[in-house]
Image (tube, rainbow, N blue to C red):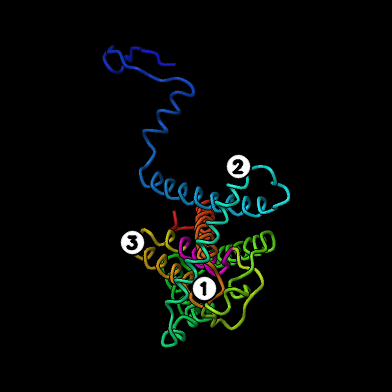
Amino acid sequence: MIEYDRDPRAGGRSKWSTLGPLRLAIEGVTSFPIKPLRWAAVIGVASAAGGGLFGLWIATNALLLGEAVQGYPSLVAVISFFGGVQLLDEQLFVFLNSLGSERWDGLWLFVTHKLSWIPFYVALMYLVHRHYGLKNMLIIMALIVVMITVTDQLANLFKHGFERPRPCREEHLKEIIRYIAPRCGRYGYFSAHAASSMAFAVFLGLLFRKIYKHLVLLLLFWASIVGFSRIYVGVHYPLDTLTGLVIGALVGFLIYRISQRLKLSGIL
């Protein structure tokens, strides 16, 4: 509720004061900074996209039980829709994968190999040590290990849950795609490479957002290139990569929030 009182220190003039939860709500709204609102909007959109993709695959796998929907035209129509989405994903993969050429294969094999980026990781850890010190660097490295473990395990959970074969496993695609990866795994939804790269990019980008303003854009571009490399070498569909990027971004943001909770000096 809102009441009006006389403040003797203000010369007896009336002023309004707020009581109870309403005061807390007003103070919270008026003091809330703008930047967190922007990040909340970005994370909200990413969450909605991730949830939509997740629901898409749940619906696809659940509704493809043909015997269960006989005599239900509406369900058949839904199955047709999701089948069309999957077909579109496959066609987009064939188009993007066919853009490659032998001239560039070596470059993309380098990009897609995790060990190729060790110097890049070392350089970023040097920046962490330079700005945050040895103790905080060790804590950040531990958080990165946790982050990569989470993305890899989530990817494994999805792969064995949805059991979507990789494009290099599909007999009807083997004759028309360019498969140049060293090996072809069994299941592909979603891409662990894309997820871990995006998680790393979001976490480090947010960590350095006040020091190197444009570093986050470079890291996001790098993560996207790594994601595309999985399509180029023939082991992931675009939807596999997109889902990995979205989930990786969410995990990276979550780990960054945890780092804030730890109150690392110089990070807040």
Disc 2: which residue:
74
Mark 3 or 1: the one toward you: 1
Residue positioned 64% across, 64% down in the render: 164
> x, y (%) of residue 55?
59, 49
Magenta span: 190-203
Q: Secondary structure at mark 3?
A: loop
Which residue is denoted by mark 3 in the rendering? 213
Density class for disc 1 (Cα within 10 Å; few <14, some 14-19, many ≥20) is many
Can you identify the residue that label 1 sits on? 230
Q: Could you tell me the amino acid type at mark 3?
A: Lys
> Vertically, is 6 above or below 134?
above
**Front residue (pair 219, 245):** 245
Q: Please identify the dominant SS of the magenta region.
A: helix
**Would you identify the image quadrant in which residue 96 lies?**
bottom left
Identify whether 156 is placed above or below 16.
below
Gap in angstroms between the C-alphas marked 3 and 2 = 50 Å
Q: Is residue 233 visible?
A: yes
* Label 3: few (<14), some (14–19) or many (≥20) C-alpha neighbours in 10 Å: few
**Label 2 CA crowd tier, 10 Å (few <14, some 14–19, many 20+):** few
Q: Residue 152, relative to residue 4: is it above or below?
A: below
Tell me what residue is drawn at x 45 percent, y 28 percent: 24
Q: Which three-letter amino acid code belongs to the residue tagged 1?
A: Arg
| Mark found first going from the N terminus, 1 or 2 | 2
Instruction: State which mark lies toward you, 1 or 2.
Output: 2
Measured Cα–Cα span from mark 1 to mark 2: 36 Å
